[in-house]
Every structure is written in structure tokens, then in C-alpha cells.
Image (spheres, helix red, strand yellow):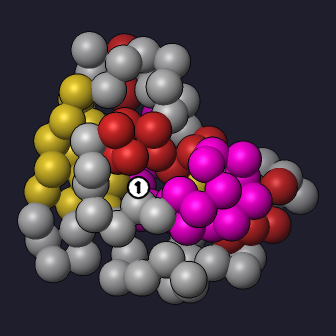
Amino acid sequence: MPTITYIEHNGTAHPVSVAVGKTVMQGAVEHNVPGIDADCGGECACATCQVYVDAAWLPKVGQPGAGSQEASMLGFAAAAQPDSRLACQITVTLALNGLIVRIPEEQH
């Protein structure tokens, strides 16, 4: 099972095992990682699961497609950055073992 490390705004790291096929958001929610609100339950409709993907992982994770629903939601997200993704839109694969994501200070 791949390990994803979620880093809170205050620097607290939460390495957790997440099953292949789940999303990075589901892994955070199932392991009670603080800062991932996931208000819409993973429907890409709220942007409260925004994460910053570690620069080394951006090539593997990729960016949201131009004009996609994810890109639109990130346009409304608090403190969105070029490395922002919605955790509900990142499906865990074996290739993402070791992925590091940072959680913004707030999700609204």
C-alpha cells in the first residue's frame, strides 16, 4: 500500500498508508488528518480538500486540465498556488508511494 505524507500548515507530518484506487482525500479523511475538510465528500464541488503537491511530485501527479471542474474550483479556493490540487482528484497508484502534500492554513 502506498504511503502518502500529509503535512499540516504547522509542519506536523502524517504519513499514512492509502489503498491503491482511493483518492488522496479519502486517505486523509479515513486517517483523521487535520485540515482536509472534504465538505462535498469528494465530488469536486467545494475545494475544501486543497493540497499543495511537493515540487518533486508534480510531474507524477500532474496539473488539473485547463477548463476542468477542478481548475474552476481551485479558482475559488483560499490561497491557491500553482502547485495546488484538490485531493479528491488525485487517485492513489503505486507510482505515488512516498507522495508528499502540504495542507493550507485554511480551506475556505
Q: Position of residue 100 (x, y in %)?
A: 27, 48
User: Up-down: is 68 above or below 3?
Assistant: below
Q: In the displayed structure, does residue 107 sit left or right of residue 105? A: right
The structure residue drawn at horizontal position 89% and vertical position 58%, both measured from the top left corner, is: 67
Q: Where is residue 35 in the image (x, y as percent from the top left)?
A: 34, 68
The structure residue drawn at horizontal position 68% and vertical position 66%, both measured from the top left corner, is: 46
Q: Where is residue 28 in the image (x, y as percent from the top left)?
A: 35, 46
Q: Position of residue 14 (x, y in %)?
A: 15, 50
Q: Quadrant of residue 27?
A: top left
User: Up-down: is 18 above or below 8?
Assistant: above
Q: Does residue 9 appear in this view?
A: yes
The structure residue drawn at horizontal position 42% and vertical position 82%, both measured from the top left corner, is: 106
Q: Does residue 59 appear in this view?
A: no
Q: Quadrant of the C terminus?
A: bottom right
User: Circle 1 is placed at which residue position?
Assistant: 53
Looking at the rendering, the stretch of residues picked out in magenta corresponds to 38-63
Q: What residue type is labelled 1?
A: Val
Q: Quadrant of the N terminus?
A: top left
User: Up-down: is 20 above or below 98?
Assistant: above
Residue situated furthest right in the rendering: 67
**Regarding mark 1 in the picture, which secondary structure is present there?**
strand
Magenta segment includes 37: no
* Tally of numbered tags: 1
Q: Nearer the viewer, residue 74 or 88?
A: 88
Q: Residues within 10 Å of mark 1 (few under 14, many from 20)?
A: many
Q: In the displayed structure, does residue 66 sit left or right of residue 70? A: right
Q: In the displayed structure, does residue 90 sit left or right of residue 47? A: left
Magenta segment includes 59: yes
